[in-house]
Image (spheres, rainbow, N blue to C red):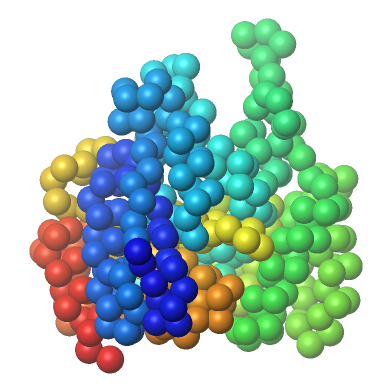
Amino acid sequence: MGETGSGQRLRLGLVDGDGIGPEVVGSARRVVDEALSAAGCRAAEWVALPMGRRAIDEFGTALPESTLDGMAETDGWILGPHDNAAYPPQHRSAPGGAVRRHFGLHANIRPVQAIPGIRSVAPDIDLVIVRENSEGFYADRNMAVGSGEFCPTPDIALSVGLVTRAACERIAHEAFRLAATRRRQVTIVHKANVLPLTMGLFRDACYQVAREYPDIRVDDEHVDATAAHLVRAPGDFDVLVTENLFGDILSDLAAQLGGSLGTAASLNCSATRAMAQAVHGAAPDLAGRNRANPVALHRSAAMLLRWLAGRRADPGLAQAADRIDRAVAATFAAGIATADLGGLASTSEFTEQVTARVHKW
């Protein structure tokens, strides 16, 4: 069984997903294994958990109950991308959203930092978007029963957004705690000028929480102004806290400013559970061609190890996470990259380069 250097058992779930999922998830596993070894930790126990098209074919559902049960028995898991738009019509609800809802993963943490060796529109960008992950304007996360979208007639579509004070306060605490470890600045992103009830509640609840963190600077911006500000002066931002849909859009913009969506990591978490999931999609056109960029999932896996290190007070896991981040950066600095970043390395070749470098510190 897997144990860390501090003697704690470590069980991690692996969810391949669709498209390039099996390739990038397999790559992340290899990098994590090497990093744990290099940090003096015992090997993790990996648990394969089916989700996506293969699960539909085998179990008749994209997210089998056995997968949810298996996730509950692990310390965290790595989730591959899913391509639910290509599923049969009766299975097209997003399984990733269902996982987040089932385990109450209310926070989606998306850091963006330019990486030396990768051409970036904004080389000074260094920020984190803290995205409320459980409600807002995403139709799969705002109703106990039903999706939150309605069609009274074939020519009329309606959507309901959900904003609660409890969820706003919870995500605000996540943002302010994170800012305390960085440059001590939080920007509340909203659209209260045209959505005064829902977004006004989000803004005001975040400001209320801010009173508990007097050492953190806080301001707020409308989401459209934030998008323009990100393009003009991304270095002005430290931590941004926002609702679900806005956070999804802004994090893609910020990731591209920082170099590429292919390097954008994220962690979905609650106080007790965490899931590593790259920001990008399944890229079915690249599936099976050994050309996918695995970096986003490498960095997401490092975030998972760092989250577990904090929860367990385990310095070995924190060191393993640092080794992954440094190895990825060193690989890019050596001029090695996959085709989407202008390089020549295949997925497997890039993985070999990163795994070799995790042992160099």
Name the quadrant containing residue 209: bottom right
Q: Is 100 in front, or is 294? A: 100
Q: Is residue 50 above or below residue 107?
A: above
Q: Is 112 in front, or is 320? A: 320
| Residue at screen point 62% across, 34% down | 140
| Residue at screen point 17% across, 52% down | 291
Residue 117 in sight in this render: no
Q: Is residue 127 above or below residue 293?
A: below
Direction from residue 67 to residue 172 in the image, left or right: right
What is the x, y in percent for residue 59? Answer: 38, 24
Residue 176 in sight in this render: yes
| Residue at screen point 47% across, 55% down | 74
| Residue at screen point 40% across, 21% down | 60
What is the x, y in percent for residue 95? Answer: 48, 36
Q: Is residue 261 above or below residue 240?
A: above
Direction from residue 300 to residue 298 in the image, left or right: left
**Residue projecting furthest to the bottom:** 361
Q: Is 191 in front, or is 282? A: 282
Direction from residue 90 to residue 339 in the image, left or right: left
Give the number of callouts. 0
Quadrant location, the C terminus: bottom left
What is the x, y in percent for residue 277? Answer: 44, 55
**Residue projecting furthest to the top:** 153
Q: Is 361 in front, or is 191? A: 361
Quadrant location, the N terminus: bottom left
What is the x, y in percent for residue 208? Answer: 88, 67
Name the quadrant containing residue 339: bottom left
